[in-house]
Image: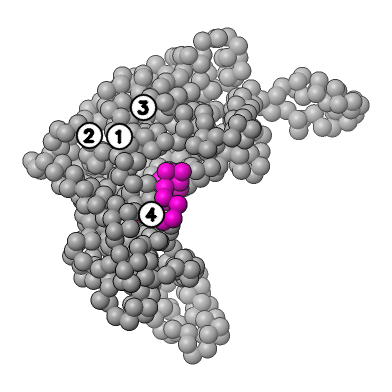
Amino acid sequence: MPKLIQSSLWKTLDAHFNEVKHSHMRDMFDQDSQRFDKFSLKLNDILFDYSKNIVTEKTMDHLYALAEECDIRQWIEKMFDGEAINNTENRAVLHTALRNRDGLPVLVDGEDIMPAVCEELKRVKKLAEAIRTRLWRGYYDQPITDVVNIGIGGSHLGPLMVTEALTPYSLHDLNIHYVSNVDENHINDTLEHLNPATTFFIIASKSFTTQDTMVNAETARQWHINKVGDDSQIDKHFSAVSSNVKAAKEFGIDENNVFQMWDWVGGRYSLWSAISLPIVIAIGTENFDELLQGAYEADQHFRSASLEENIPVTMALLGIWYNNFFDAQTMAVLPYDQHLNKFPAYLQQADMESNGKCVDRQGSVVDYTTGPVLFGEIGIAAQHAFFQLLHQGTKLVPADILAPVSNFHCIARHHRALMSNVFAQTEALMKGKTEQEAYAELKAEGLDEDAIKALLPNKIFPGNRPTSTFLFNSLSPATLGSLIVLYEHKIFVQGIIWNINSFDQWGVELGKQLASGILHELDDNAPTKQHDSSTNGLINYYKEQRIKNKGENSL
Ligand code: G6Q
């Protein structure tokens, strides 16, 4: 296949883009009363409306043809079948196996991994239920009241996002805390109010070498030992999730409390693995099974739906359309569900760590843009913050809107107010406000012609700002599982089309290397000379100031 942008289909898309780039969605809706029906899809209780995008039927035909030409179907099967599609690390990518409910084997190097997956899940559930039912006892024979997950990146964001999202399904007398930042404030603020006799730690680190996590884990261990007097009670208060079982045991964690991860699960795709331990402790095994079931159903949809009916494929193609043709640099994710408040941060890692790449699968630098800058915030809060730029700024920011038809504790007055914002915003972003409309409004307010003339340009909204809306019945565990998977697979499809490996993260590894190098230079107060002048200047300023701040106890 010729390189992406030299392919004839890409050129067709480019020509088509030039035909439609000045079209306005307002006219598209006026001309086609069936637009919503044509451009919306369903998966169980999730409605995906993508009709408020700058696309025609022809656009979608070309985009689906592009997906076809990029062999999406074969790639999907390669992933589910455990081929080593993470080519730079020569690894399979099998987070899908962690939620596989069909009972069929999944082979890695000829070996069925499903028995190990099921066994590990059973162990996670057993520990979680022991804590939830208060059978698990701390060193004073008291039940656990607080669980602290220490991890970062993929060992943090997924569990954090899911436990927040499923708050209504959680035990209320068991608190789950997350510590990720090596900044001492994070762990200090967390431990300050906790009782070591009733606190249980999970050290979540696939590698068990990540500096931030290991420094926090050591502090937690010391905090525990200081209170107990020795390390004899670690078994009752510490567990680990890691693919480096040896290191976890060396840290002092009882083998029975160490849960296995595998190298075919990427950190940012690992919330389905034993990394879910804090989630299962929070929501229990039945709800966790529902989460897996929802994820599995979205996997099935992805595998079996035609490209045209396939939600992740459609999401991915819309992203390509804006990213590569409209030259949009960003995308926004705007949940109108308070419990999804960590969803944008979670997706930021999933998307940007996966597709923030400039080298293709063959090792050449790409000559087209890849993953967008993803950002987001709770929709209502964002309306009062950055929606101004979405409505009237100079940048095109395609946005995803997510909203529940009803809430776990639905209070009609609140919910109607919330939903009125969802519908009003997506309509306004699409339609905008014409000069005539703005003029008529100002006139109706009684402004004179001079005042109208001065104000009018500011009151015009160009519209034609794309949004895709996900409406779901309520944020149940199953629905959440499906939503996460739709995004995971969208990212995968985009990676295939851009011909990049979405499953490595060399940029993250670089950060890990750099920090550990400089850490040793901070062990003493001798001036550093080996970096550029800015880095030397910053390090040496820090060293001088810490002496001033703390006197001789600066180290
Ligand atoms: C995710 C990345 C990265 C990773 C963290 C933590 O895909 O690999 O975010 O999850 O750096 O790594 P450990 O789990 O090994 O501590």
Instruction: Kindly indicate whether the residue at mark 3 contacts the one at mark 2 (C-beta within 8 angstroms).
Output: no
Instruction: Kindly indicate whether the residue at mark 3 contacts the one at mark 1 (C-beta within 8 angstroms).
Output: no
Cβ at disc 2 under 8 Å from ligand 1: no
Numbered badge on residue 156: 4
Which numbered disc flags the more N-terminal residue, 4 or 2?
2
SS of the residue under disc 4? loop
Side (left or right) of 196 relative to 249? right
The quarter of the picture where residue 78 lies is top left
Residue picked out by circle 3: 313
Which numbered disc flags the more N-terminal residue, 1 or 3?
1
Query: Residue, x 64% and y 44% (percent of image)?
Result: 385
Q: Give yes or no for residue 154 being in the magenta stretch.
A: yes
Q: Amino acid at mark 2?
A: Arg
Real-space Cα separation, disc 3 to disc 4, in angstroms: 27 Å
Residue picked out by circle 1: 293
Of the residues tagged 3 and 4, which is closer to the observer?
4
Residue extent of the magenta highlight: 153-174
Q: Amino acid at mark 4?
A: His
Q: Amino acid at mark 1?
A: Gln
Cβ at disc 1 under 8 Å from ligand 1: no
Badge 4 crowding class, 10 Å Cα cut-off, few under 14, some 14 to 19, many 20 or more, is: many
Instruction: Kindly indicate whether the residue at mark 1 contacts the one at mark 2 (C-beta within 8 angstroms).
Output: yes
Query: Residue, x 34% and y 41% (percent of image)?
Result: 287
Side (left or right) of 406 relative to 283? right
Which numbered disc flags the more N-terminal residue, 3 or 4?
4
Query: Residue, x 61% and y 18% (percent of image)?
Result: 26
